Image: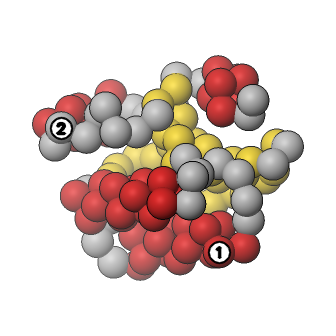
Amino acid sequence: MIVEKRRIGDHTILAVEGVIKLGESAQFLAETLERLLEEADGHVLLDLERINYIDSTGIGELVGYLGRFGERQRRLVLVHPSERIRRLLQVAQLDDLFPTYDDLEAATAAECR
């Protein structure tokens, strides 16, 4: 998994590429989100456009960090989720929990106010 980080205003965009599944990739994502939780301010916009696959472990990490960011009055936002990711969130009844946008422009316009 590859993660590219950049800032727009006070917020961080994480462009993630590859797979998020049980093992190193889910752990790497969790470590990256943990660092952002501790070291940065603002919302995190997680760009999933180049994610090929995510399993329940990856979804679990997202849900866990959604709560942790929320405790600090911050948001974890999903951008460009594939239809598969959207379906996984719907089946798990998590789709209403995550702020989700189809493109980065809409996400930054809504979240960077």
| Residue 104 drawn above or below residue 18 | above
Mark 2, residue position: 93
| Residue 80 drawn above or below residue 68 | above
Q: Earlier in the sequence, mark 2 or mark 1?
A: 1
Q: Nearer the viewer, residue 50 or 56?
A: 56
| Residue at image location 40% in from the left, 39% down from the top | 98
Q: Is residue 70 visible?
A: yes
Q: Nearer the viewer, residue 19 or 9?
A: 9
* 94 relative position to 19: left or right: left
Say which amino acid is labelled 2.
Answer: Gln
Q: Which x, y percent locates residue 92?
A: 16, 43
Give the label on residue 38, or none: 1
| Residue at image location 31% in from the left, 32% down from the top | 96
Q: Which x, y percent locates residue 46?
A: 56, 47
| Residue at image location 18% in from the left, 37% down from the top | 93
Characterize the local packing of mark 1: few (<14), some (14-19) or many (20 or more) Cα atoms within 10 angstroms.
few
* 78 relative position to 8: left or right: left
| Residue at image location 61% in from the left, 44% down from the top | 45
